[in-house]
Amino acid sequence: NAGVTQTPKFQVLKTGQSMTLQCAQDMNHEYMSWYRQDPGMGLRLIHYSVGAGITDQGEVPNGYNVSRSTTEDFPLRLLSAAPSQTSVYFCASKDAGGGTGELFFGEGSRLTVL
Amino acid sequence: GENVEQHPSTLSVQEGDSAVIKCTYSDSASNYFPWYKQELGKRPQLIIDIRSNVGEKKDQRIAVTLNKTAKHFSLHITETQPEDSAVYFCAASIRDYKLSFGAGTTVTVRA
């Protein structure tokens, strides 16, 4: 299993440009989420999904869109990039089963907005 | 929403000594408290977690304690080793797929 795969790993955008961060998981996990990591602020939840066709907002959703058309994929779209969106983005997935609460993270995508 | 505070922000310990990181949370309904370790340039990985029906959990050199009355929980690392150097994040949640993280503690183990 590849686990959680994010692309691209690095991206530089100009203010106003749009782009999509891709996330795919091959563990058949129901739950998927996007976090952003900024120095001194930990990881903050952007959007999450509890299953295909279902998405909801997290703590910092403004400026981002998501969709979940399949169990495997959960892309994050930046509609009009702003310098405040410079960050490292992590996609994560979790099994819906009642056992472990572990989130499995991707390797991260470092985004710079100029 | 849930607010998690984590202290200290940095911690330097001598190899072999213990390290303690403390977190407080605001929502008394939170019932799941994981700890993640993130090495430099890597992804966060779960090291231990505890649910609200348990007061303490231990896994080799790592232990977590939970005080629901005071709404705080702590990570204890004993006999620290150089490979324990990393950033540690606590988190709290009602739904374990929707975590609220603390700001992180950078732990440095001095040889």
Image (tube, coloured by chain):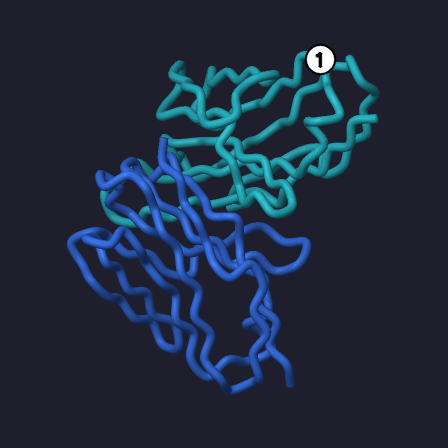
**According to the colouring, which chain is cyan?**
A
Is B78 above or below relative to A51? below
Is A64 above or below relative to A30? above
Percent x, y of residue A11 = 78, 31
Q: Which of the two residues, B64 or B25, is positioned nearer the viewer here?
A: B25
**Is there any visible trace of residue A73 in the rendered image?**
no
Q: Pointer 1: what residue? A: A80
Q: Which of the two residues, A69 or B59, is positioned nearer the viewer here?
A: B59
Binning the other alpha carbons within 10 Å of mark 1 as few (below 14), some (14 to 19) or many (20 upward) gives some
Percent x, y of residue A74 = 52, 24
Colour of chain B, in one word, is blue
Residue B4 found in image quarter:
top left
> Which residue is found at the position 53% from the left and 53% from the top?
B104
Is A110 above or below relative to B111? above
Q: Chain of mark 1?
A: A
> Which residue is found at the position 34% from the left and 46% from the top?
B25
Q: Which of the two residues, B52 or A41, is positioned nearer the viewer here?
A: A41
Is B12 above or below relative to B55? below
